Amino acid sequence: MQIDQFKDKIMSVEVGYLIVPSEKVMIVRNKWNLEQALNKLMESGWSSVPVLNEKDEVEGVISKTSILQHARLEKVPYYHDFQRKFVSEAVNRDIPTLSEDTLLRYGIELLVDWPYLPVINKERQFSGILTRRSVLDHLLKVFYEENGN
């Protein structure tokens, strides 16, 4: 197979085929308090997770770091005070999202700067995440199929 055909086969797939589906992704709700969110992050071991509203739309992501930075900036002195602050106050809204029909060639450029990207469906609801791992798995699969291994 020519290199251009190989490249096209890899990069022209829609990201919706490569995502970790929403039911397998840990999320946090924007109405939760920061204590709930931090506990969820600590229990799971994830450093950040998508934040969804009541309509399952992506609001952004929340991380342990963003929670602690928000607490520092807002002068929240004690952990029990996290119950009075909400995820919606500390969420990072600057994360890009992809639609399920976005071609991988566009999503892969964004993954250089993000460990994962939230993916939304036609109704703008969360459908899963595109991860660096899912992209690398796809690349390996195509490579091995083409090389007969």
Image (tube, rainbow, N blue to C red):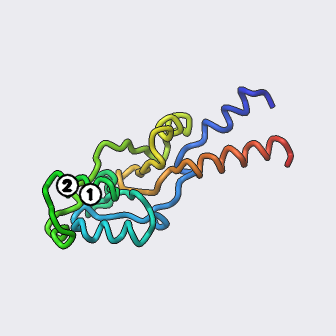
The residue depicted at 44 percent of the width and 48 percent of the height is 117
Q: Which mark is residue 3?
A: none
Q: Quadrant location of residue 62?
A: bottom left
Mark 1 neighbour density, 10 Å: few (under 14) some (14–19) many (20 or more): some
Q: Is residue 75 left or right of residue 131?
A: left
Q: x and y percent of residue 108 in the render?
A: 53, 38
Q: Amino acid at mark 2?
A: Arg
Residue 14 is left or right of residue 26, and the answer is right
Asked whether disc 1 touches disc 2, contact meaning CB atoms under 8 Å apart, the reply is yes
Q: Nearer the viewer, residue 76 or 98?
A: 76
Residue carrying label 1: 68
Neighbours of disc 2 within 10 Å: few (<14), some (14-19), many (20+): few
Q: Left of 44 or right of it: where is 14?
A: right
Amino acid under disc 1? Leu
Q: Position of residue 47 (x, y in %)?
A: 41, 58
Asked if residue 91 is positioned above or below residue 6 in the image, the reply reads below
Residue drawn where x is 50% and y is 60% of the image: 21
Mark 1 falls on what kind of element?
helix
Q: Which residue is mark 2?
A: 72
Q: CA distance from mark 1 to mark 2?
A: 6 Å
Task: Please determine whether, in this image, residue 12 is positioned above or below residue 67.
Answer: above
